[in-house]
């Protein structure tokens, strides 16, 4: 990956921030936004994490539901 100047990194972060609502509204995936910005998905996720946006956005009720589904699945096996 090419090292960006602080100015270029700031511009990239600004563009990523402008595109964040598209991810939140499920219009674009992280991969699509990364493609638009010309960076890897992993780099985009790093940028968002630095800004305080988690990659996974599950609340505790969703986590509990997934755990219960997992338990039911393996109980049958």
Image: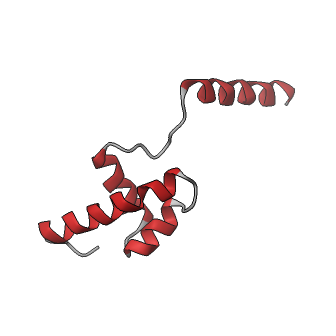
For residue 16, side relative to residue 77 (left or right)? left
User: Where is residue 19 drawn, in percent x and y?
Assistant: 41, 62
Q: Nearer the viewer, residue 50 or 71?
A: 50
Decide: is 63 above or below 2.
above
Q: Give the residue drawn at x 29%, y 47%.
A: 51
User: Where is residue 62 drawn, in percent x and y?
Assistant: 62, 30
Q: Residue furthest right?
A: 76
Q: Give the residue drawn at x 42%, y 56%.
A: 20
Q: Give the residue drawn at x 21%, y 66%.
A: 9
Decide: is 6 above or below 76.
below
Q: Give the residue drawn at x 86%, y 27%.
A: 76
In the rendered view, how is the structure colored?
A: secondary structure
Q: Residue furthest left?
A: 6
Q: Nearer the viewer, residue 70 or 60?
A: 60
Q: Quadrant of residue 11?
A: bottom left
* Figure quadrant of the C terminus: top right
How many marks on residues? 0
Q: Nearer the viewer, residue 20 or 37?
A: 20
* Figure quadrant of the N terminus: bottom left
Decide: is 73 above or below 21.
above
């Amino acid at each position: 990956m090419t090292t960006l100047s602080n100015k270029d990194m700031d511009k990239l972060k600004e563009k990523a921030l402008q595109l964040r609502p598209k991810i939140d509204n499920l219009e674009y995936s992280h991969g699509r936004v990364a493609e638009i910005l010309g960076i890897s998905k992993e780099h985009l996720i790093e940028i968002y994490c630095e800004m305080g946006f988690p990659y996974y956005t599950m609340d505790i009720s969703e986590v509990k539901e997934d755990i219960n589904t997992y338990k039911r699945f393996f109980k049958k096996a």
